Image: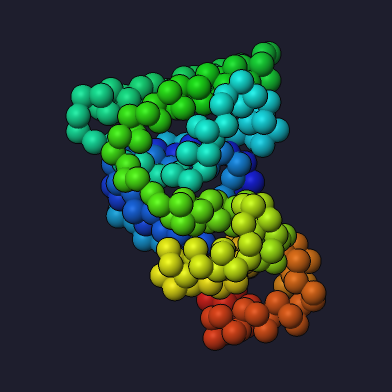
Amino acid sequence: MHFRCGVYLVCVRGSAVVSTGIQHYRIGEQSELIFLQGSLMQVVEASGDFRVRMVTFSRELFLEAVLPIDSPYLDYTHEHPGYRHTQDERSQKTWREILLWMDVARMLFVEGGTQFRRQQELNFLQSLLMWVFNTIQEKIGGTQQYTRKQALSHQFVGLLREYATREHAVSFYADRMCISPRYLYEVTVECQGGRTPKQLIDEQRLAEVKVLLSDPHLSVTEIAEQLGFADQSYLTRFFRRHTGMSPKAFRAGIR
C-alpha cells in the first residue's frame, strides 16, 4: 500500500521484513517505524504471529501540529525511520509509554465520540510528536556516527520516498540537497551498493507501479498518468525492462 498520510507503527509481536521501495527494514517485537508524511510500504515476508499497532494522520494535520517542533528532530526522523528498543530500563520505559499512547488513540478515535474530534486529533498528534522527539536523544546514543556522504545518502532516500512518484530527474534531488548531480552520483555509488541515482529513482518508481497494479480498478493508462509516464506504452516498456513481464502479466499473478 501507499500511505498518503503519516504513519507511526510499532510491532508488538512476531517479525517481518517491510519494504519502502529501495529500502528494507527488518522489524520485530518492540520495533517502530515512523514516516511523518507517508510512504509506500510492502510486507515482503512475515511470521505467522506478526502483529502491529499503528496510528495514521493526514498531512494537513501533521503540518499544523508540527509548527512548534524544531526541524533537526524532523530531519533525524526522516533519515532514521526505524528503531528497535533495547533491554535497558530507559528504553523499556519508552516502549511501555508508546503502548499507552496507542491506548489513548484507541480510546479517543475508535471508542470515543465525535463532538470535539478535530481538536482532539490536533492536540493528540502534537503531544505525541513532542513526546516522540523527546525520545530521540536516547536513540541517538545507540546510533553510529555517519560520514557526510552517508548522511546525504539517507537524505536522498527520504526524498525518494516523498517525491519519486512525480519527480524523476536526478537534478531535482541534487538541487533539493544543494549538491551537484555529479556529487550525488558519487554519494549513491559509494553508499548504496554501487547503484546510481537514476537506478534508485527507477527502483522506487517500479515499487510504486507494483502498488498501483494491485488495485484492479486502475487501468494501466491511469497508472501511467498518475506516475508521470509519457503514455501506457512507455510504462509497459519500463516495467518489462525491470521485471521481464508486462504489467498485465504481473497483475494476473497478483490475482
Tell me: residue 106, above or below residue 182: above
Using the rendered image of the protein, determine whether residue 212 is visible from the camera's viewpoint. no
Please indicate whether residue 123 sits to the left or right of residue 96 in the image: right
Tell me: residue 69, above or below residue 18: above
In the image, residue 193 lies at what x, y percent?
41, 70
Tell me: residue 14, above or below residue 12: below
Residue drawn 70% across the image and 77% down it: 235
Please indicate whether residue 69 sits to the left or right of residue 90 in the image: right
In the image, residue 124 lies at what x, y percent?
55, 20
Residue drawn 63% across the image and 62% down it: 180
Using the rendered image of the protein, determine whether residue 140 is visible from the camera's viewpoint. yes
Please tell me which residue lies in front, 13 or 21: 21
Please tell me which residue lies in front, 201 or 24: 201
Quarter of the image containing the N terminus? bottom right
Please tell me which residue lies in front, 25 or 209: 25
In the image, residue 128 lies at what x, y percent?
50, 23
Residue drawn 50% across the image and 22% down it: 130
In the image, residue 108 lies at what x, y percent?
54, 19
